[in-house]
């Protein structure tokens, strides 16, 4: 096999395969996350969601994609054609390029850059231009205002989110995404247990970064129509849409890698084995979980009213059973295969958990007004993240120079930061009350 | 591999020069900003070719992702349609062009005549995997004072910009 | 790996960008463009740590310059350098 491929191309084969897999799977994944969002929204609003197109609405994304591709491409009259064409392209390209440094598994990473995290942040910063130029090129007041507001929001929360990430970086000691996960493996615990406030800051910052509720003023339907996306239709709009959901997955991937342990399982240092085998107890957890889901589907299958839904539930149960079998089988495979399959499973599970938080917040919190949003970013999150950094640095100094226990010092630093947060919130309340009293 | 290096260098430098010329000559300011972004990205790519990966990423995040967003904001907030109709170049253009070319010719001569005696550092022959750590070490040990002065400069600039752009109610 | 590109090539590139910058600053009327082009002239210096400081300074100068332009625009409603002549005799 080695002599069939020229030697100079061999280092590029695996990254290219990974890249092709990611680019091929991503639009489908984004479509199904939209379906998941609509189903979760329906569940929280005590209704069913899409049920017509395909069993339980599972073919809904495909119908949506076909509709979008067949729609007429409307270009406003005095639109700036170069920028109008270029803006969604820029958004979606930057969203996809960011996947190059994301570690989905120990071997499933397109490029293990030394500055991986900064690379993803840089590429996300470039994605802002897709929004700004899209709004400008549409030659419409709503689009321009929506684009400028959105860009201002993104730039403001980028700082806070970055500072939140640095708090995990101080513990990891490297910018390479793979090194960060390996640091969590070496220290035996996910970083969220050491820096929960950093995780919270990054959570809020990432929700604002992706223009999701409650920070979705620039693109909410009842506000500025659709903001920068107003004048786009058909395929161009679907590019923006894909860019937004790809950004969500990227941001979830960063949070997973830095705070939730990447591809590691929950209790990393718990190495007890099943008696007599070399299989670790907790490694059996994924297949047990999926087996549980499969059994639940089989339990629900006879209770469906319609025959096709019975068959469908049975099919889903069968698929879950197959997945559980693969996960269990991987336990007895050589180590790289096991790490790869289980790693991918845990990574996707954590990403979907983080995305579930996004969906949950969307349907729970009311929308922030734009000035409230900017006040939250500049006057609460940035000071909070700076204080968090300072206290964490002091905690690390105490641990590394004077040998205190890391858990104790991080709990102390979290306590101080929470105290400062309470002070900031109290001062802000007074500030916002003064604002409304002035009739603003 | 060396051939790929040369190809990338010539492509990126051609992109930088062409984008710079386009930026200087566009009638539409927003197009000019787009070409400035392209120039900055090409320069960042050249930094990457010189194995200065931290500088590459800093240029993209700060310059392209921060300063240029600021520029584009101001352009979109103050843009006057009327300015698009007037002639874009001022009355000094010929004299300015000649002077600029004369200046450039002088510097060209200086570099050309001194190219053998100028001991420029050779670019690193292998991939310096610890570039970010090296820059961090330099910034916090050897260049600590300039670092602190730069942070004070940024603080002053921030206060100045806020004061000047604030609306006096 | 870099042995095939002599170091002077980078100097020529810097010179070319600097020249275009000078021409731009001297000939364009719109002050925003002048500011953009001015900042491009700094993009052509060498030395990594020095370059980081140059980027920092360019950021500070861009922020203050844009603040001045905004304040000026609010008073005089014009962006053309020809019309900013209030200090002339």
Image (cartoon, coloured by chain):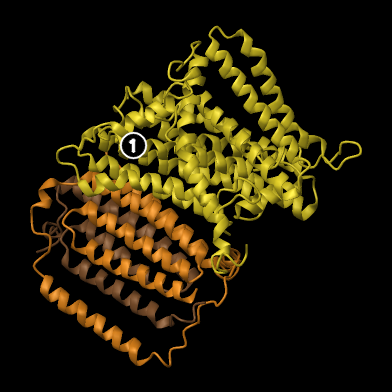
**x, y percent for residue A419:** 62, 33
| Residue situated in front as seen by the camera: C49 or A341 | A341
Q: For numbered disc 1, what is the local secondary structure?
A: helix
Dot 1: few (<14), some (14–19), or many (≥20) neighbours within 10 Å? Answer: some
Give me the residue at 26% from left, 53% from top: C68
**In the rendered image, which residue does mark 1 sit on?**
A149
**x, y percent for residue C87:** 15, 61
Instruction: Place residue A301 in its image quadrant.
Output: top right
What subunit carries mark 1? A
Instruction: Place residue B44 in its image quadrant.
Output: bottom left
Q: Looking at the image, can residue A171 be seen?
A: no
Instruction: Place residue A273 in its image quadrant.
Output: top right
Among the chains, which one is orange? B
Task: Give the total of numbered labels.
Answer: 1
**x, y percent for residue A220:** 36, 26
Give me the residue at 71% from left, 52% from top: A397
Quarter containing the C terminus of chain A: top left
| Residue situated in front as seen by the camera: A6 or A256 | A6
User: On screen, A318 above or below B80?
Assistant: above
Residue A347 shown left or right of residue A160 in the figure: right
| Residue situated in front as seen by the camera: A42 or B54 | A42
| Residue situated in front as seen by the camera: A139 or B82 | A139
Q: Looking at the image, can residue C38 be seen?
A: yes
**x, y percent for residue B50:** 48, 72
Give me the residue at 54% from left, 61% from top: A12
Among the chains, which one is yellow? A
Give me the residue at 27% from left, 40% from top: A135
Among the chains, which one is brown? C
């Amino acid at each position: 096999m080695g002599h069939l491929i020229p030697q100079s191309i061999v280092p590029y084969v695996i990254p290219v395969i990974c890249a092709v897999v990611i680019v091929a799977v991503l639009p489908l994944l984004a479509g199904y996350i939209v379906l998941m969002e609509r189903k979760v929204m329906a569940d929280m609003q005590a209704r069913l969601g899409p049920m017509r197109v395909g069993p339980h609405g599972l073919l809904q994304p495909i119908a949506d994609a076909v509709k979008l591709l067949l729609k007429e491409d409307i270009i406003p009259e005095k639109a700036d054609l170069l920028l109008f064409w270029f803006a969604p392209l820029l958004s979606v390209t930057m969203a996809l390029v960011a996947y190059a440094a994301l570690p989905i598994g120990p071997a499933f990473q397109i490029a293990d850059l030394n500055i991986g995290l900064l690379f993803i942040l840089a590429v996300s910063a470039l994605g802002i231009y897709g929004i700004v130029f899209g709004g400008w090129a549409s030659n419409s007041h709503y689009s321009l205002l929506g684009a400028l507001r959105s860009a201002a929001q993104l730039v403001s929360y980028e700082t806070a989110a970055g500072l939140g990430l640095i708090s995990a970086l101080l513990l990891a000691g490297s910018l390479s995404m793979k090194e960060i996960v390996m640091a969590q493996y070496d220290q035996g615990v996910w970083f969220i247990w050491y820096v929960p406030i950093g995780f919270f800051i990054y959570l809020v910052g990432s929700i604002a970064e992706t223009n999701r509720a409650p920070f979705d003023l620039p693109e909410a339907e009842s506000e500025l129509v659709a903001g920068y996306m107003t004048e786009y239709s058909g395929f161009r709009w679907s590019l923006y849409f894909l860019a937004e959901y790809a950004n969500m997955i990227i941001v979830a991937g960063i949070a997973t890698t830095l705070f939730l342990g990447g591809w590691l399982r929950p209790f990393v240092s718990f190495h007890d084995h099943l008696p007599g085998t070399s299989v670790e107890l907790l490694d059996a957890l994924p297949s047990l979980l999926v087996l549980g889901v499969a059994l639940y589907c089989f339990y629900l299958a006879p209770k469906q009213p319609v025959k096709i839904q019975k068959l469908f539930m049975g099919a889903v149960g069968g698929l879950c059973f197959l997945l559980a079998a693969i996960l269990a089988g991987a336990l007895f495979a050589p180590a790289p295969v096991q790490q790869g399959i289980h790693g991918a499973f845990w990574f996707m599970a954590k990403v979907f958990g983080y995305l579930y938080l996004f969906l949950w917040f969307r349907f729970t919190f009311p929308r922030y007004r734009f000035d409230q949003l900017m006040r939250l970013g500049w006057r609460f999150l940035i000071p909070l993240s700076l204080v968090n950094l300072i206290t964490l640095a002091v905690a690390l100094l105490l641990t590394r120079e004077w040998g205190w226990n890391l858990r104790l010092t991080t709990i102390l630093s979290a306590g101080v930061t929470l105290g400062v947060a309470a002070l900031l919130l109290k001062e802000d309340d007074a500030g916002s009350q003064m604002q409304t009293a002035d009739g603003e | 591999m060396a051939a790929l290096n040369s190809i990338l260098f010539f492509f990126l430098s051609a992109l930088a020069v062409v984008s710079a010329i386009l930026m200087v000559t566009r009638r539409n300011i927003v197009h000019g900003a787009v070409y400035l972004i392209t120039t900055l990205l090409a320069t960042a790519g050249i930094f990457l070719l010189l194995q200065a990966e931290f500088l590459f990423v800093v240029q993209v995040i700060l310059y392209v992702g921060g300063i240029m967003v600021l520029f584009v904001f101001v352009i979109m907030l103050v843009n006057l349609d009327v300015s698009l109709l007037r002639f874009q170049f001022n009355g000094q253009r010929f004299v300015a062009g000649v002077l600029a070319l004369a200046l450039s010719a002088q510097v060209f001569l200086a570099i050309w005549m001194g190219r053998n005696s100028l001991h420029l550092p050779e670019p690193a022959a292998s991939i310096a995997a610890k570039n970010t750590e090296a820059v961090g070490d330099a910034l916090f040990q050897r260049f600590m004072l300039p670092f602190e002065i730069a942070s004070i400069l940024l603080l002053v600039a921030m206060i100045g910009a806020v004061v000047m752009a604030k609306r006096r109610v | 790996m870099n042995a095939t590109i002599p170091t002077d090539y980078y100097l020529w590139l810097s010179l070319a960008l600097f020249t275009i910058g000078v021409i731009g600053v001297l000939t364009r009327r719109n002050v925003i463009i002048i500011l953009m082009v001015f900042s491009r002239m700094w993009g052509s210096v060498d030395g990594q740590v020095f370059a980081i400081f140059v980027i920092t300074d360019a950021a500070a100068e861009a922020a203050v310059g844009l603040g001045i332009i905004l304040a000026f625009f609010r008073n005089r409603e014009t962006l053309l350098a020809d019309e900013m002549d209030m200090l002339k005799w």
